[in-house]
Structure formats: structure tokens, C-alpha cells
Amino acid sequence: MTALGFLYPGHSAEDDYPRIEQLLGSDIRVDVVHTDIGEDAHRVDALRRMGEAERLTAGVEELRLAGVESVVWACTSGSFVYGWEGAHEQVRGLARAAGTPASSTSFAFVNAVREIGARTVAVGATYPEDVAELFAGFLRAAGVEVTGVRSSGIVTAAEVGTWGEAEVLALARAADHPDAQAVLLPDTALHTAAHVPALEKELGKPVLTANPVTVWEGLRLTDRRVNAPSLGFLFLREPIVQA
């Protein structure tokens, strides 16, 4: 059994995680601890407060006692708003507190883009435009070319959590660009675990979405490789692991 730990801010799309655990179809356990979201607002100041070390480390002890082998801060905006260096310091603090390898969803996207061999990506963000552009800047700092950013201008995670498949598909279509080798949907408040195959079929290219990518990152940190076709192209690149 491989136990993966996730710190998830508040309550929006956390039900993606038990769904992903089921879809992995292997001896993988997904443990989720909720952190205090503070003010639910996609504003830089609020997002930086949400990602403060005190809020994150408060949940780490529960994951440590559960015996997890990796910890991932399951929040994109609450990590990339710190910039490339600040986001590294954030996960270093998590690793020290947890005593395990640690990462965040922002780095998960960077690593997943590299894993699938994409050089150019398009971004479909639920966030306001200024926050969405910060994510694009984070990707560029990692050497990823961003062909364009589509912003939906949504201020709260609570509203994002109400979106269904139709809205997710519409965002992905609007974000896609002919030069993009993959499309990224970065918000962990967005339910996507059930929709990745439909998204990839519609666009004809890999679509990386926040919650599946976050779990993939947890697996990567533990050197686990799981083949799970129902989670999309990213999970097809790994050899099958027998339970």
C-alpha cells in the first residue's frame, strides 16, 4: 500500500480525490486533510494568506500520523502566487514539517508537462485575468511556452465547485490553441476527474487538470507508476503496476 497525503483548501471539489483513488485501481491510498481557506477569493493577497506556512503545517501532522509517503499542497493559485522561488520555499517547509517529499499543484503541472513531452501549452483558468497570468508566468519560469490564457474571471472557489462537465468542456475549448500541444486547467476547485477522457477526445490532445495532476505528483514523489486510462493521457505514460 502506498499512502499519498494531500492538503486541500476548504471544500469545493475534494470529492475528486476518492474518485481518483478508485480509478487508480491499485494499492494506492489517498488521504486528504482540509486546510483553512480563510477568505474565499481569487485575489493575490487572499491567496497568499491561504498558502501561508502556518495554515499548511497545521494539517501536516494528521497526514504524518496517517503514515503518508508524500505530501502535496493541493492548490495551484495558493502556490504560484508566491512566484517560482517562493513556491519552492513553500514546499521545502512542507517537506521539513512532514518528513516526506513534498510538492504543490503548481509544480505538479510543470512536472506533468515535462512528462508528456509538451513544449507549448494553452491555459484555461477559472481565475480572474491577473491571477491567471501569474500562473502563465510560473509556467514560463519553468521554461514552458504558453500560447495563450483564457480567464473565466471567477472570484470564489465555491462558485468554481458548482461547474459541471458542460462548463469544463466549454472552458477547455475556449482555451485551446492550434499551437498548443496540451491544454491546462489549473484550479483544484474545479471538478475534472470524471471528465478528462471526454476533454481529450474533444480537443484531440492531452488535457492536464488540477486534481488528477496533483495525485499524479504524489505518485511521482513516491516513485509509483500506475496505469489508469480513465484519468487521461498523463496516466497512460506509466507502465502497469500489479497490485
Image (cartoon, rainbow, N blue to C red):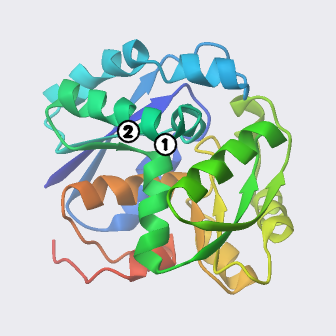
Say left or right for 127 vs 189. right
- Helix, strand or loop under label 1: helix
Q: Residue at x 47, y 60 (%)?
A: 110
Label 1–label 2 contact, CB within 8 A: yes
Where residue 52 appears, as percent x and y from the top left, is 46, 18
Residue that badge 2 annotates: 88
Q: CA distance from mark 1 to mark 2?
A: 6 Å
Residue pushed farthest bottom?
204
* Residue for point 16% across, 39% down: 100
Q: Which amino acid type is shown beneath numbered disc 1?
A: Trp
SS for callout 2: helix
* Quarter of the view holding residue 228: bottom left
| In-front residue for pair 66/121 | 121
> 197 above or below 48?
below
Residue 36 location in percent, x, y? 50, 16
Q: Residues within 10 Å of mark 1 (few under 14, many from 20)?
A: some
Kind of residue indicated by mark 2: His
| Relative horizontal placement of residue 7, taking residue 152 as reference (left or right) | left
Q: Which residue is mark 1?
A: 84
On the question of residue 25 being in view, the answer is: yes
In the rendered image, which quarter contains the N terminus?
A: bottom left
Task: Reply above or below: 138 against 11.
Answer: below
The number of discs equals: 2
The C terminus lies in quadrant: bottom left
120 or 95, which lies in front? Answer: 120
Query: Residue 94: which numbered mark, if any?
Result: none
Q: Position of residue 151 (x, y in %)?
A: 83, 49
Where is residue 152? Give x, y as percent. 85, 47
Q: Is residue 80 left or right of residue 228?
A: right
Q: Is residue 37 visible?
A: no
Label 2 neighbour load within 10 Å: few <14, some 14-19, many 20+: some
